[in-house]
Amino acid sequence: MAKMLCKGTRKDGTPCRGVALEKYGGYCLAHGAPPEKAHEWRAAGGKNSATAVRRDKRMPEHLKEPIDHIVDYMRRLAEKDPTPAGLNALSRAAKTLIELRRFANEEMETIRAEEIRAEAAARLDVQTDLEVLEATDDIRAMRDRFHRESLVEQGFARFIEPPRPDEPPEVLLNEKGRLRFGLQHVEDRQAFLEELDDGLFDYVRGKPGHPGLP
């Protein structure tokens, strides 16, 4: 016996292709079941999908609940007839969901990196404690200091006092250094950019004075 199709119509006006059920008077689950029941089934289907299961495995535990709330809220909004207020709320919810998932992805990347580093350290029988990280920072700082001193010793730059006494001295390239590294026009470019920035600031405040601006 051929299956009967649902008597309902979709939101776009096309006939529903769902299977008609006798207990719902010839309508499918979506069109015949009580709204709260249909919503419950849709939510369960989404949570049990393969995509949702894979997502949960890479989702920080403390972010699962707020993300599920946002998804549920968006699903309920989508089930209603579209209105400007509803579409605006749906757009805000979508932006919130994107931000939450981006934050979750970043956090999981950090967790995975720490796990990989710990596993590699265990295989190599080395320590990944704070002392190792501090030693790495010391090596990086030493390399940067040698690079600055090398520029000064070769006559490409000179030291200037830093803004704060606890910071290392800054390095300023001289004319020889700018020529060596292709930065001979850096001061002119910087002055031009500062002048353009001032002009744009005045333009935004309603005082156009830059010849290139209307």
Image (spheres, grey):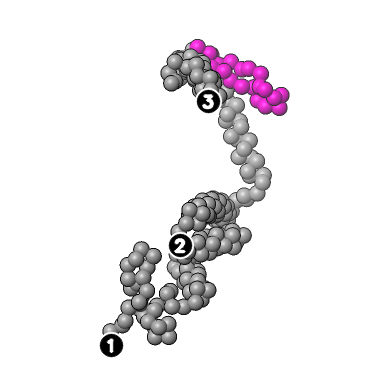
For disc 3, the marked residue is 204
- Which quarter of the picture shows residue 61? bottom right
Give the x, y percent position of residue 30.
43, 74
Residue that extends furthest to the bottom in the rendered view of this protein: 1
3 or 1: tag closer to the N-terminus: 1
For disc 1, the marked residue is 1
- Choose between 36 and 64: the one closer to the eye: 36
Answer yes or no: is residue 180 visible: no
- Calculate the distance from the C-alpha at mark 3 to the C-alpha at mark 1: 73 Å
- Choose between 194 and 180: the one closer to the eye: 194
* Label 2: element kind: loop
Label 2 Cα neighbours within 10 Å, binned few <14 / some 14-19 / many ≥20? few
Please report the residue visible at 58 percent of the width from the left and 29 percent of the height from the top: 144
Q: Which residues are magenta?
A: 155-175
Q: Amino acid at mark 1?
A: Met
Label 3 Cα neighbours within 10 Å, binned few <14 / some 14-19 / many ≥20? few
- Calculate the distance from the C-alpha at mark 1 to the C-alpha at mark 2: 36 Å
Please report the residue visible at 46 percent of the width from the left and 78 percent of the height from the top: 33
Does residue 183 sit above or below 114 in this rendering? Answer: above
Q: Which marked residue is nearer to the observer: mark 3 or mark 1?
A: 3
For disc 2, the marked residue is 81
